[in-house]
Image: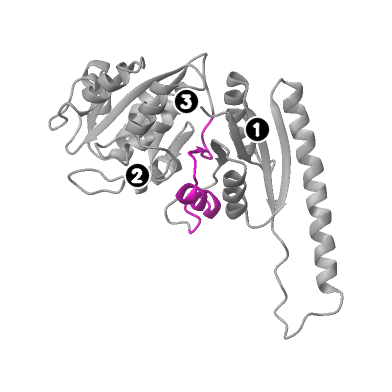
Amino acid sequence: MYRHIVVAFDRSPLAREALSAAAWLAWRCDGEIDLLEAVRPPLPLLTPRPLPGVAQAETEALMNDLAERKTQLSHEAQRLRESGIRANGVAIPGAPAGAILEYTRRFRADLIAMGTHSRSLAERWLLGSVAMEVIHHAPVPVLIVPRQARFRHEEQLRVLVALDGSELSEKALAGALMLTYTVPTSLTLFEVMPGEAPAPEERTPEWYATPVIGAGDYLDSLCTHLGGQGQTCERAFSAGDPANEILDYAEHGEFDLIAVSSHGRTGLDRVLLGSVAERIIRRANVPVLVAARSSLPSLEAQSRMAARA
């Protein structure tokens, strides 16, 4: 269950969109939000020896900056508390990615929520270096709100789970299952096989529900496994480029969120799902839940924990 959420917050519109998603999750499950902002210390001057008084002045400037950010974050947290959501404002010194990761580990948060400004692979800041570093090293799933995305939801959250048959890709399903323990959620498991799909206007709901060539019974077995835990799910199929097909179906099916894993691997064409995840994040119109290699227990281990609960 995602009950303790760290929101990387800088008062930008994207950060507020990420906060909106996190606040809804926390409100639905009586969870808690930590609004976290990292303040970079001043860069040291490249001089042979420290200049008199410079270190002290830099320290004072950093402390003043931290105090100002803390005050601003406290006001934001107070607004959340007035809405019935437990919230704290935290400003800490350090580089943003490292500060987010260290804070998450130290206080054992369940989820990180953040926005990302990137849109082009040609840009050096692929997902924004901060978001990329957090995704790759986070001990928990990361809820990313891309620049063009908006968090929309009804009473039930509709989640599209991208799978490729690998154990690593099933981290996405494990992350989505955590949502089902947090808020009412419907899951659709989606598998993309090599090949070519019909033109978009020819893809009916019946076409997506029919296994494509080579799909096998992988999704059926997962649905049966989940059914044994009392969790129902739908399954859907397509063929072609994984990122394009996932994005097309997410829009076609009017999903609220896409769940993917990083560092997974597709079967026949050996395409890294990590790169697929990056492409999805750059172009998605809804938030993307990214589960990294080490961020969650395996699906089997999570099933055992659910059975004991």
Q: Residue at x 78, y 37 (%)?
A: 74
**Image marks 2 and 1: residues in contact by CB distance under 8 Å:** no
- Nearer to us: label 2 or label 1: 1
Left or right: where does residue 122 sit relative to residue 71?
left
**Direction left: furthest residue:** 213
Residue drawn where x is 39% and y is 30% of the image: 302
**Front residue of this view, candidates 102 and 61:** 102
Q: Earlier in the sequence, mark 2 or mark 1?
A: 1
Q: Is residue 65 above or below residue 156?
A: below
Please identify the quarter of the rendering in which residue 73 is found. Answer: top right
The structure's colour scheme is: one colour
Q: CA distance from mark 2 to mark 1?
A: 29 Å
Q: State the residue position of label 3.
A: 179
Q: Nearer the viewer, residue 37 or 213?
A: 37
Could you tell me residue 279's position as x and y percent?
A: 39, 44
Q: CA distance from mark 3 to mark 1?
A: 16 Å
Q: CA distance from mark 2 to mark 3?
A: 22 Å
Residue for point 17% across, 45% down: 268
Q: Is residue 119 visible?
A: no
Residue interval drawn in magenta? 124-150
Q: Is residue 136 magenta?
A: yes
Q: Look at mark 1 in the image and give the residue it sits on.
A: 33
Callout 3, which amino acid? Leu
- Secondary structure of residue under mark 1: strand
What residue is pinned by disc 2?
Answer: 276
Between 127 and 77, the one nearer to me in the picture: 77
